Image (tube, coloured by chain):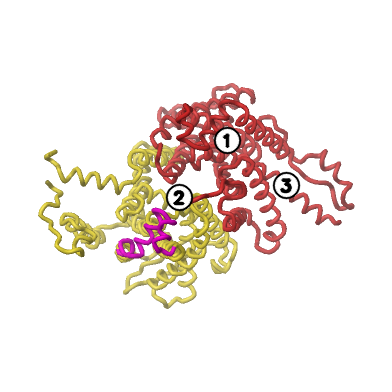
Chain colours: A yellow, B red
């Protein structure tokens, strides 16, 4: 009743293949975007920006990136934390080496650098498959974190070993450093996310995406019908690392401001991003967003309930957080292995009939 | 031959010992992977949980004391008695077997026929759950584990090898605990091999590992096999937990040994028990020697963090199924 597709007739292939074929979806999406660009920036404050919106936007970019690699191309990667670190450190080096360059370009170039590193570590994927590859990407994770820790050039020989984001502005709005306003930073990240998400959506339904999916479903069969496995896998690694690198650059420059590589970009971060796409749904754009929202909101919610409401000590709350996150992951996998995106699809199916069951 | 050379030999020997410790963890992975095709990320946390439980029983801690105190405002922490090590190990083993049964009943049963990646994710979830659960149950402070295995340098070896070098060589320094670990690992592997070769259950295990459907069709219960395998893996985790716990204390970082066992597995192949042992030895020696010869003098040290992975990565490019893994045959 509320959600229906009756009367939505498509007369061309183009119209049938659009991202939101159903009118209701299109309207809902437009309203969400308008709200995100108008109401949220006007009402946002420091707490909401830092606890909810910024991590959500940035991790969504990372999740889209990993979803391209794992969900669409089928190559499991546990190196996202390391690739985010590449983005962050590339961004830092660019920001300090070229102070006059616009931050947008610094972030884009650091994404490009990460893409190069990602393709380098993606090379073995041609021979190594499945779990062996997943563990092999851990090599990237540990090696990169060690590299940024041990080579002082990367952190400009600072005594603490940390990197700090200098102040930069875009169109007169300060977006990095301690003086940035939450609204400006929010809009900055949102713009990045929107542009990147549109590109990703179009890549995955175009010929590149179809090649990736062919490789994912069965690489030998794909090779026989003429998909070049080297090019497909490397482009997947490249595009994915580009996204993950941009997420890392944003995480460092805009969100955190100061970063110590082992703490921020450790193996835990790789797992976090992987959780997002598994819980959200592999091979689904909506899933990347849903997973990121879930994994960002859950700890905030749990902390508010346990520390805020019950007044428990923070260490007990932290243990409970682990316990509940673990439980929910297993729960979701058992109830719906294809993630929140599949649940959403099922809900939509139900909504189509509601309130009349037949 | 100078003291430098002998120091190199000592590093080599210590590398072998460290390799045995890695193998102990890798063994648990291989057992579960062979029998159920599940890549069990939680193996490291299982070792941590087993060690925590063991310490908890030994010291007579009250489970969930922190939580109970937080909810009811009480001040309890210990029962006030201490359990002998042997009894505590038996109890901890019991807990691990109970855990195996619960895992089968609550998780694996519902995830039959899912893709391997989903099962892998489930074990990561399990690892998170157990980590929170273990900390909640026994507290997260660093604990000392002592089950009566002597520690520290072995003087006998040190005295009897001193004559090899010149005046500036004082004999090989080897940790007694590591020597015990080597012996225990050897016993463990031998008994596992004997068990799987000569007992009925062992044969059933190998049948399941070979072919699930064929095993089912000759009347082997897949579910009870899984319980047994997870139980054995729990036992191996307990042994690994005791060894690592005695060495470096029972704490959160114990669960990270799972990450060190992964390159061992890649090198040895996911499906081979001897592979786990030999892979462990290669990794242990390789990373210690690399750190000693190249890492510490030229690269600023701490190369142990990534060397094993790089070695495994490069190795796999040439032999994708590991040293002893079954040859990967792909069909369309």
Stretch of the chain drawn in magenta: A202-228
Rendered-image quadrant of the C terminus of chain A? top left
- Crowd around label 1: few <14 · some 14–19 · many ≥20 (10 Å): many
Residue B173 in the image, given as x and y percentages of width and height: 78, 45
Q: Could you tell me which secondary element the residue under label 3 belongs to? A: helix
Q: CA distance from mark 2 to mark 1?
A: 23 Å
> What chain is tagged by disc 3?
B
Give the quarter of the image for residue B290.
bottom right
Labels 1 and 3: the sequence-earlier one: 3
- Crowd around label 2: few <14 · some 14–19 · many ≥20 (10 Å): some
Q: CA distance from mark 1 to mark 3?
A: 22 Å
Q: Nearer the viewer, residue B219 or B313?
A: B219
- Asked if residue B255 can be seen in this view, the reply is yes
Q: Could you tell me which secondary element the residue under label 1 belongs to? A: helix
For label 3, the residue is B14
In the image, what residue occupies the spot 41% across and 56% down? A221
- Crowd around label 3: few <14 · some 14–19 · many ≥20 (10 Å): many
Residue A332 in the image, given as x and y percentages of width and height: 35, 41
């Amino acid at each position: 009743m509320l959600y229906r597709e009756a009367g939505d007739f498509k007369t061309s292939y183009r119209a049938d293949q659009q991202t939101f074929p159903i009118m209701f979806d299109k309207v809902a999406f437009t309203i969400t975007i308008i709200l995100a660009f108008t109401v949220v920036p006007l009402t946002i404050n420091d707490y909401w920006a830092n606890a909810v919106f910024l991590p959500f936007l940035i991790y969504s970019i990372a999740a889209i990136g990993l979803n391209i690699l794992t969900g669409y191309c089928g190559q499991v990667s546990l190196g996202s934390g390391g690739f985010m670190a590449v983005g962050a450190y590339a961004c830092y080096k660019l920001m300090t080496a070229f102070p006059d360059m616009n931050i947008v370009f610094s972030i884009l170039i650091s994404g490009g650098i990460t893409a190069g590193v990602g393709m380098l570590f993606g090379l073995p994927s041609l021979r190594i498959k499945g779990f062996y590859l997943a563990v092999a990407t851990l090599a990237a994770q540990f090696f990169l974190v060690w590299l940024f820790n041990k080579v002082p050039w990367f952190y400009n020989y600072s005594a603490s070993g940390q990197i700090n984001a200098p102040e930069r502005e875009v169109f007169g709005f300060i977006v990095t450093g301690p003086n940035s306003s939450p609204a400006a930073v929010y809009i900055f990240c949102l713009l990045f996310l929107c542009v990147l998400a549109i590109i990703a959506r179009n890549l995955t339904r175009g010929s590149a995406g179809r090649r990736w999916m062919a490789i994912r479903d069965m690489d030998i069969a794909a090779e026989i019908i003429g998909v070049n496995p080297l090019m497909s896998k490397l482009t997947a690694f490249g595009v994915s690392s580009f996204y993950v690198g941009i997420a890392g650059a944003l995480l460092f420059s805009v969100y955190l401001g100061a970063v110590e590589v082992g703490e921020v970009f450790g193996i835990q971060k790789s797992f976090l991003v992987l959780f997002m796409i598994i819980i959200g749904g592999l091979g689904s754009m909506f899933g990347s967003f849903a997973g990121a929202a879930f994994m960002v909101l859950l700890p905030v919610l749990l902390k508010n309930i346990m520390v805020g409401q019950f007044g428990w000590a923070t260490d007990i709350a932290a243990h409970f957080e682990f316990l509940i996150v673990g439980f929910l992951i297993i729960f979701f996998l058992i109830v719906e292995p294809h993630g929140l995106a599949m649940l959403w699809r099922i809900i939509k199916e139900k909504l189509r009939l509601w309130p009349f069951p037949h | 031959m100078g003291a430098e050379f002998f120091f190199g030999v000592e590093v080599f020997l210590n590398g072998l010992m460290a390799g045995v410790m890695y193998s102990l963890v890798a063994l648990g992975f291989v057992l579960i992977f062979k029998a159920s095709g599940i890549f069990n990320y939680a193996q490291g946390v299982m070792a941590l949980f087993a060690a925590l439980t063991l310490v908890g029983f030994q010291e007579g801690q009250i489970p969930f004391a922190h939580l109970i105190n937080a909810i009811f405002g009480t001040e309890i922490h210990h029962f006030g008695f201490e359990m002998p090590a042997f009894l505590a190990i038996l109890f901890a083993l019991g807990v691990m077997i109970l855990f195996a049964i619960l895992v089968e009943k609550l998780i694996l049963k519902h995830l039959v026929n899912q893709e391997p990646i989903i099962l892998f994710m489930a074990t990561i979830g399990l690892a998170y759950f157990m980590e929170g659960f273990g900390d909640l149950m026994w507290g997260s402070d660093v604990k000392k584990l002592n089950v009566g295995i002597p520690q520290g340098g072995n003087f006998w070896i040190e005295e009897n090898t001193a004559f090899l070098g010149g005046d500036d060589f004082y004999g090989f320094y080897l940790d007694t605990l590591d020597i015990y670990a080597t012996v225990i690992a050897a016993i463990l592997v031998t008994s596992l091999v004997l068990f799987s070769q000569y007992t009925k259950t062992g044969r059933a295990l190998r049948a399941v590992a070979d072919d699930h459907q064929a095993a089912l069709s000759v009347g082997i219960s897949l579910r009870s096999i899984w319980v047994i395998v997870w139980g054995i893996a729990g036992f191996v985790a307990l042994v690994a937990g005791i060894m690592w716990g005695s060495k470096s204390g029972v704490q959160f970082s114990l669960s990270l040994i799972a990450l060190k066992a992964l390159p061992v597995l890649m090198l040895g192949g996911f499906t081979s028990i001897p592979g786990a042992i030999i892979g462990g030895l290669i990794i242990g020696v390789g990373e210690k020697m690399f750190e000693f010869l190249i890492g510490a003098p030229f690269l600023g040290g701490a190369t142990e963090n990534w060397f094993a992975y790089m070695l495994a990565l490069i190795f796999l490019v040439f032999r994708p199924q590991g040293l002893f893994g079954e040859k990967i045959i792909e069909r369309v």
